Image (cartoon, rainbow, N blue to C red):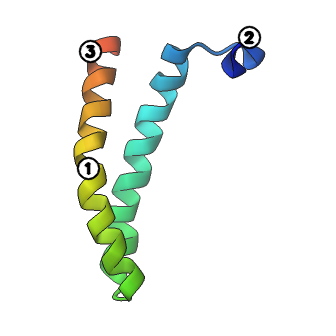
């Protein structure tokens, strides 16, 4: 039994919900949080976001292929 089986969710259904939420969170971080923070931690977060963005593009591409978006 998979963990998702317990909740009646399939991998496709989970992906369909996760992709828009991930996009919303990353946009919020990019546009609302980081521009207003000049701490060392924010500088590190900017660098981390630069490595995450290409991965998000891959996830969106997967979603587009699967959901026809």
Residue 65, compared with residue 26, is above or below; it is above
Secondary structure under badge 2?
A: loop
Residue extending furthest toward the bottom? 39
Mark 1–mark 2 distance (CA, rounded to whole Å): 33 Å
- The answer to whether residue 68 is visible is no
Asked where in the image residue 44 lies, by quadrant, the reply is: bottom left
Q: Is residue 4 above or below residue 42?
A: above
How far is mark 3 from mark 2, CA to CA? 27 Å
Residue 57: where, in percent of width, then height? 24, 38
Task: Provide the secondary structure element on which disc 3 rests.
Answer: helix
Front disc: 1 or 2 = 2
Looking at marks 1 and 2 on the same chain, the residue that comes earlier in the sequence is marked by 2
| Numbered circle sitting on residue 1 | 2
Can you tell which mark lies on residue 53? 1
Residue 65, horizontal then vertical, whole percent: 26, 15
Distance between the alpha carbons at the discs numbered 1 and 3: 19 Å
Mark 3 crowdedness (10 Å alpha carbons): few <14, some 14-19, many ≥20: few
User: Left or right: where does residue 25 sit relative to residue 44?
Assistant: right
> What numbered label is drawn on residue 34?
none
Pointer 3 residue = 65
Q: Is residue 19 above or below residue 11?
A: below
Given this view, does label 3 or label 2 mark the residue nearer the observer? 2
Q: Is residue 45 visible?
A: yes
State the residue at coordinates (74%, 19%).
7
Query: Do the CB atoms of the residues marked 1 and 3 lie less than 8 Å apart?
Result: no
Query: For the residue labelled by badge 1, is the local secondary structure a helix, a strand or a loop?
Result: helix
The residue shown at (37%, 44%) is 23
Task: For the residues labelled 3 and 2, say whether their Cβ atoms are less than 8 Å apart.
Answer: no
Q: Earlier in the sequence, mark 1 or mark 3?
A: 1
- Give above or below for 33 relative to 62: below
- The answer to whether 30 appears left or right of 14 in the picture is left
């Amino acid at each position: 039994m998979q963990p998702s089986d317990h909740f009646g969710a399939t991998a496709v259904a989970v992906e369909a919900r996760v992709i828009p939420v991930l996009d919303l969170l990353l946009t919020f971080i990019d546009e609302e949080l980081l521009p207003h923070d000049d701490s060392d931690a924010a500088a590190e977060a900017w660098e981390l976001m630069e490595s995450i963005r290409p991965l998000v593009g891959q996830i969106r591409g997967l979603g587009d292929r699967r959901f026809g978006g």
